[in-house]
Image (cartoon, grey):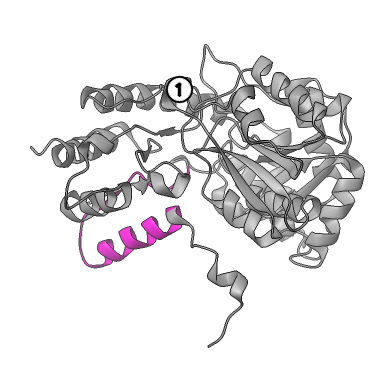
C-alpha cells in the first residue's frame, strides 16, 4: 500500500516502541521490569474519578466548545495565577488531547516551511517529528552533562540564523530531569525577544520539582509579553492522568484562536468526561502531588546512588522522574550504542530502558524511577550486572 512521503520520514515513538517490545516479551512468559514509560505509578485521585462518573451520570456526553468548556479554561488560567502570579483569563487557554496535541497545534500554527526551530539536546522524543510535520527544520542545540544538560545563551547564539522562528524549552526536562532556574528562564526569554524568536515553554512536569529547587515558569514573562511565548501544561504527570489525555496551553488570544482552528479540523473538543475530571483536579486538593514528590525524591536518591556507583557520570536531577546517565564507556562490540545496549539489557535481564539516541544523545540511556523502591532496586541491580559484566 502506498503512503505519503511525509510519513516515511517520521519515526515511531521510541518510548512506546520499547514498551511494546516489553509487552511482547511478557506475553511470552518473561518477567519484565519497565523503567521505560514516563508515567507515575500512583492512581488517579478518587475525587477526579468521581467527577468523571458524575459527568456520565449527568449525561455530560455531548460535544463541547473546541477549545474546552469555559469553566475548565478559567481553571487553567487560575492555575497560572495561583502558582505563578500571572494575570490571565480563560480566553488565553485551550484544552487539548494531552500536552502532545498542544505542542503539535502550536507548531502547526507558528511555523512555515523552511523555518528553523531550536531544540536543546537531549530533547523529548516527539519534538523533531512534530517539526517535520510542519516542514520546518530542527536545529539542535548541544548541551553537556557537566552543565546539567541546560542550554546557555552562548549555545543558542551559536546556532541562531535569520531563519530561526521558535525555541522549544522543556523544564523540568524529559529525559534528564534537570531544571532551569527562574533567572535562567528569564534570561533566555529576553534573548529570544531581542531576536524575535517565539518560545514554546513545555512545563508539563512543573509541579514535580524537588527542594531546594523551586518550580520555575515563564508565566509572568508571558503576562508582560504574551505575543512572544506559549506555555504548555498537562495533568498527566501531576495528577496521574496519562490515559485521560488532557493538556492545555497558555497563549495569546489570537494564537489560541489559531490553535482552535487546527484542533477543530482534527479532533474537535477533547473528551467531555475528561474535561469534568480535569476541572475537579485543578479545583480540588493537590495532596497527591506532595505525596508523589516525597516518593520520587527517595527513589531519585536511591537510583542516583546506584548508578553513580557504577562509575557513570550523571547530573542529579531536580525534577520529573528520570535519570539520564552517560553510559557509553560500558558499550561493547556486541552492544556498541545505546539502542543495542538497551536491547541487550532487555533480552538478558528483562529490564526495559529507552536508548539515549531517541533523545539525541547516544552516549546515554534514560531510566524512569516511577516504580516502587524494591522494583527499582531489583531492576538497577540487574542492569548493573550487564554493564559491569558480573
Q: Is residue 197 left or right of residue 136?
A: right
Residue 259 in the image: x percent, y percent?
A: 82, 54
Query: Does the magenta run of residues contain 34?
Result: yes
Residue at the location (39% across, 34% down)?
Answer: 324
Query: Does the magenta run of residues contain 44?
Result: no
Give the total number of marks visible in the rendering.
1
Residue farthest left in this picture: 390
Say above or below: 54 vs 141: below
Q: Which residue is mark 1?
A: 294
Residue 186 in the image: x percent, y percent?
A: 72, 20
Residue at the location (58% across, 35% down)?
Answer: 238
Say above or below: 66 vs 362: below
Residue 362 in the image: x percent, y percent?
A: 37, 44
Q: Is residue 305 visible?
A: yes
In this orientation, which residue lies closer to the viewer: 363 or 23? 363
Say above or below: 15 vs 329: below
- The stretch of residues the image draws in magenta is 15-39
In this orientation, which residue lies closer to the viewer: 274 or 247? 247
Amino acid at each position: 500500500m502506498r503512503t505519503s512521503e511525509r510519513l516515511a520520514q517520521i519515526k515511531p515513538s521510541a518510548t512506546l516502541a520499547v514498551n511494546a517490545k516489553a509487552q511482547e516479551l511478557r506475553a511470552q512468559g518473561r518477567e519484565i521490569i519497565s523503567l521505560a514509560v514516563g508515567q507515575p505509578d500512583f492512581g488517579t485521585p478518587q475525587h477526579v474519578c468521581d467527577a468523571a462518573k458524575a459527568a456520565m451520570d449527568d449525561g455530560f456526553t455531548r460535544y463541547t466548545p473546541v477549545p474546552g468548556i469555559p469553566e475548565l479554561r478559567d481553571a487553567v488560567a487560575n492555575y497560572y495565577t495561583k502558582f505563578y502570579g500571572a494575570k490571565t483569563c480563560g480566553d488565553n487557554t485551550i484544552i487539548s488531547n494531552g500536552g502532545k496535541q498542544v505542542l503539535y497545534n502550536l507548531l502547526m500554527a507558528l511555523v512555515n516551511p523552511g523555518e528553523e526551530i531550536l531544540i536543546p539536546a537531549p530533547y523529548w522524543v516527539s519534538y523533531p517529528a512534530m517539526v517535520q510535520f510542519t516542514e520546518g527544520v530542527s536545529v539542535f542545540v548541544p548541551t553537556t552533562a557537566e552543565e546539567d544538560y541546560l542550554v546557555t545563551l552562548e549555545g543558542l547564539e551559536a546556532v541562531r540564523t535569520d531563519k530561526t522562528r521558535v525555541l522549544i524549552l522543556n523544564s523540568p526536562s524529559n529525559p534528564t530531569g534537570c531544571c532551569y532556574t527562574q533567572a535562567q528562564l528569564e534570561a533566555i526569554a529576553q534573548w529570544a525577544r531581542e531576536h524575535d524568536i517565539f518560545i514554546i515553554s513545555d512545563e508539563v512536569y512543573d509541579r514535580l520539582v524537588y527542594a531546594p529547587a523551586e518550580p520555575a515558569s515563564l508565566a509572568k514573562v508571558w503576562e508582560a509579553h504574551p505575543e512572544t511565548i506559549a506555555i504548555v501544561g498537562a495533568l498527566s504527570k501531576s495528577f496521574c492522568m496519562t490515559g485521560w489525555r488532557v493538556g492545555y496551553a497558555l497563549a495569546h488570544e489570537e494564537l489560541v484562536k489559531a490553535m482552535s482552528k487546527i484542533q477543530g479540523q482534527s479532533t474537535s473538543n477533547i473528551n467531555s468526561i475528561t474535561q469534568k475530571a480535569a476541572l475537579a483536579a485543578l479545583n480540588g486538593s493537590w495532596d497527591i502531588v506532595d505525596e508523589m514528590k516525597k516518593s520520587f525524591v527517595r527513589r531519585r536518591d536511591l537510583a542516583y546512588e546506584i548508578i553513580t556507583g557504577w562509575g557513570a557520570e550523571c547530573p542529579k536531577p531536580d525534577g520529573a522522574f528520570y535519570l539520564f546517565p552517560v553510559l557509553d564507556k560500558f558499550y561493547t562490540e556486541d552492544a556498541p550504542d545505546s539502542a543495542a545496549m538497551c536491547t541487550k539489557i532487555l533480552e538478558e535481564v528483562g529490564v526495559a530502558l529507552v536508548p539515549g539516541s531517541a533523545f539525541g544523545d547516544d552516549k546515554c540511556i534514560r531510566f524512569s524511577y516511577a516504580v516502587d523502591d524494591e522494583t527499582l532496586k531489583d531492576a538497577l541491580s540487574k542492569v548493573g550486572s550487564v554493564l559491569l559484566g558480573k
